[in-house]
Image (cartoon, helix red, strand yellow):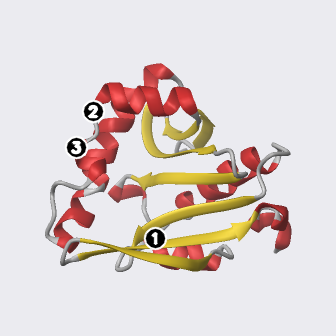
Amino acid sequence: MGMSVTISAASAQDAEQILKLQYLCYQNEAELYGDYSIEPLTQTLDDLRAELDRGHGLVARLGDEIVASVRGSVDASGTARIAKLIVHPRMRRHGLGGRLLDAIEDHFAAQPEARRFQLFTGRRSEGLRLYRSRGYAPVATEEDGPRLRFVTLEKAATAGAYAASA
């Protein structure tokens, strides 16, 4: 019998494992855009710990191993900014990214100040399809150098989690 994946809040003790997973997961993005200086590959452990302290993070575990993660925070304008949804390459295409996205949305939807969810990704990123399937719509694009273009996507927090609307 195999182990099941569990999702829970990230703690400060998880930061090192999250950072290692982040580094692994963003290699494909860096290769896709020809840019290995992207922020997820240059973020320090101290920066990650500070990011977790300022917001909320989730991890998915298979046994003791962190195999996926996402984090975010709500800003003063009521925007829940969701960031760095990562899934270990061997765990992709099993719905784990969608489960984490739903879970972080549920967390922020429970906060009355959160009026909308927002995230960004590279315009050629695999995540774009997932985000659109969950009701996110493009609201802006931004160029960062000659090769990298980010797409900002957004949806209303009042729309509820994807699972609730299915």
Tell me the number on the disc at residue 48: none
In the image, residue 123 above or below residue 87 = below
Dot 1 falls on a residue whose secondary structure is: helix
In the image, residue 39 above or below residue 54 = below
Please say whether residue 10 is visible from this viewpoint: no
Q: Name the residue under label 2.
A: 44
Dot 3 falls on a residue whose secondary structure is: helix
Q: What amino acid does circle 1 point to?
A: Gly
Real-space Cα separation, disc 3 to disc 1, in angstroms: 20 Å
Dot 2 falls on a residue whose secondary structure is: loop
Tell me the number on the disc at residue 127: 1
- Comparing 77 with 86, the one in front is 77
Q: Position of residue 161 (x, y in %)?
A: 77, 62
Q: Which numbered disc, 1 or 2, marks the residue closer to the eye?
A: 2
Q: Are marks 2 and 3 in contact (CB under 8 Å)?
A: yes
Q: What amino acid does circle 3 point to?
A: Thr
In the image, residue 144 above or below residue 59 = below
Mark 3 Cα-neighbour bin, 10 Å: few <14, some 14–19, many ≥20: few
Q: Position of residue 75 (x, y in %)?
A: 64, 45
Mark 1 Cα-neighbour bin, 10 Å: few <14, some 14–19, many ≥20: some
- Comparing 80 with 69, the one in front is 80
Q: Are marks 1 and 2 in contact (CB under 8 Å)?
A: no
- Comparing 33 with 146, the one in front is 146
| Mark found first going from the N terminus, 1 or 2 | 2
Real-space Cα separation, disc 2 to disc 3, in angstroms: 6 Å
Q: Position of residue 35 (x, y in %)?
A: 16, 64
Real-space Cα separation, disc 1 to disc 2, in angstroms: 23 Å
Q: Which numbered disc, 3 or 1, marks the residue closer to the eye?
A: 3
Tell me the number on the disc at residue 42: 3
